[in-house]
Image: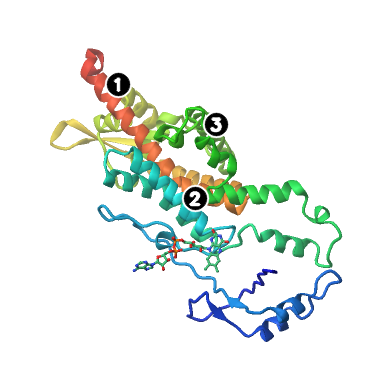
Amino acid sequence: MVNFIAERRGVGDETVDWNHAVNPAPIVELFRDWRFDWLDVPGVIAAADEILEYPMVDRDPIPRWTFGRTTLLGDAAHAMYPNGSNGASQAILDARTLALHLATAADAPTALAAYEEARRPATTALVLSNRQQGPEKVMLLARERAPEGFADIEDVIPSDELAEIAAGYKRAAGFLPEILNAPLTHPAGPMTAESLDDVDAARLAAVISPLRRTLLSATRASAHLPDIPDAQIEIVRALPRGVTRTPGELAELLGLGRSTVSNLLTLMEERGLVQRRAVPGDRRRVDVTATAKALGLFERFDAASAALVAGGAQRLDAGERAVLTAALPVLERLRDALDEERRATASRTSTHSPRKEAE
Ligand SMILES: Cc1cc2nc3c(=O)[nH]c(=O)nc-3n(C[C@H](O)[C@H](O)[C@H](O)COP(=O)(O)OP(=O)(O)OC[C@H]3O[C@@H](n4cnc5c(N)ncnc54)[C@H](O)[C@@H]3O)c2cc1C
């Protein structure tokens, strides 16, 4: 038996039927020139008993899967172009994650929420990236680099590059064997929440700080911005255009002592970054705003750092960029979780420390 797929990109009609037999003649015509001494492609197509037409169909990602004790999984949740061994594989990953959360969460609604949180961003990114080229992009690369053909694929796309393209896609699709197999072969035995959700916290922490430092210094250099200390940056960030806060509110928001904030504001006022104004009728209240100069500097900083990140992302392959996109909401939640923890610690400390209260 010979099973083959011949793919043609174009605009399809509305029919979504994968059992639709078609006339081979127009397909033979499309591949008329594909006669090689080792394979007669139009001959193979013409001789087939039956040719089925498989339209490429997907659906836009949806914002919600879970409704009470009901959730979606597989194609119902994220029908995608079956590029890169996908569709069914993603349904299996859904099932694996859902089973884990059902087995380990306190109740079904919590399990379903955790499942959706784990799977929806990842599959959303994949539905969108599958509209571009999947790992099949190696074929286009070969055609671009060697339009006249080649004797050895290694001369056109080195094996390291081929392996990286394949691994990048597997990473984006969530089925890179090393990652997928790690929790299941964990010496601790059966799959547990700890093993599957294990994050290499030390490695992540070791990436975040240098990443931020590098971005800060590269941005300063590229936009010729002055060196403003981190704490002062945090204060200006807390005072976006149109927002006024008291020094006490800034201290609370940023988890800093009031005297620290007061010293910072004095220095920043000298540099023309903030203005402090007494509120008429309330002698004890002072309002702080960021100056136009500070806001202008930050707008330049934000534009330059976004451009640098966009430039850096261009060096990643499409699969890696999809992983990064899918990770953004998770990183934002991690930031919020750390911030909550910081606030809780600050409020415990201020309740127990007479020194802080005095500040
Ligand atoms: C042409 C083509 C090629 C593909 N190639 C690949 C590939 O190489 N690799 C890959 O991983 N994926 C591939 N896929 C995708 C893969 O087939 C799907 O992602 C996968 O089948 C989805 O599984 P599912 O269980 O979510 O949905 P389905 O497989 O669609 O299962 C849903 C089931 O529910 C039944 N059903 C519907 N309504 C009702 C109802 N009211 N009551 C009871 N039953 C109902 C349906 O009959 C169906 O059996 C391909 C898809 C197509 C169309």
Q: Which residue is mark 3?
A: 210
Residue 319, percent from left and from top = 58, 52
Q: Does residue 274 appear to the left or right of 7 in the view shown?
A: left
- Disc 2 marks which residue? 325
Residue 55 in the image: state x and y as whole percent: 54, 74
Residue 191 location, x and y as percent? 44, 36
Is the residue marked by circle 2 packed among few (<14), some (14-19), or many (20+) residues within 10 Å? some
Location of residue 114 (image quadrant): top left
Q: Earlier in the sequence, mark 2 or mark 3?
A: 3
Is residue 316 visible in the rendered image? The answer is no
Could you say which disc has been placed on residue 259 in the image?
1
Q: Which disc, if any, is residue 277?
A: none
The disc labelled 2 sits on which kind of residue?
A: Thr
Gap between marks 1 and 2 measured at Cα: 40 Å
- Image quadrant occupied by the N terminus: bottom right
Q: Residue at x 42, y 45 (%)?
A: 97
- Residue at horizontal 71 percent and vertical 62 percent from the top: 139
Horizontally, is 2 left or right of 53 in the view? right
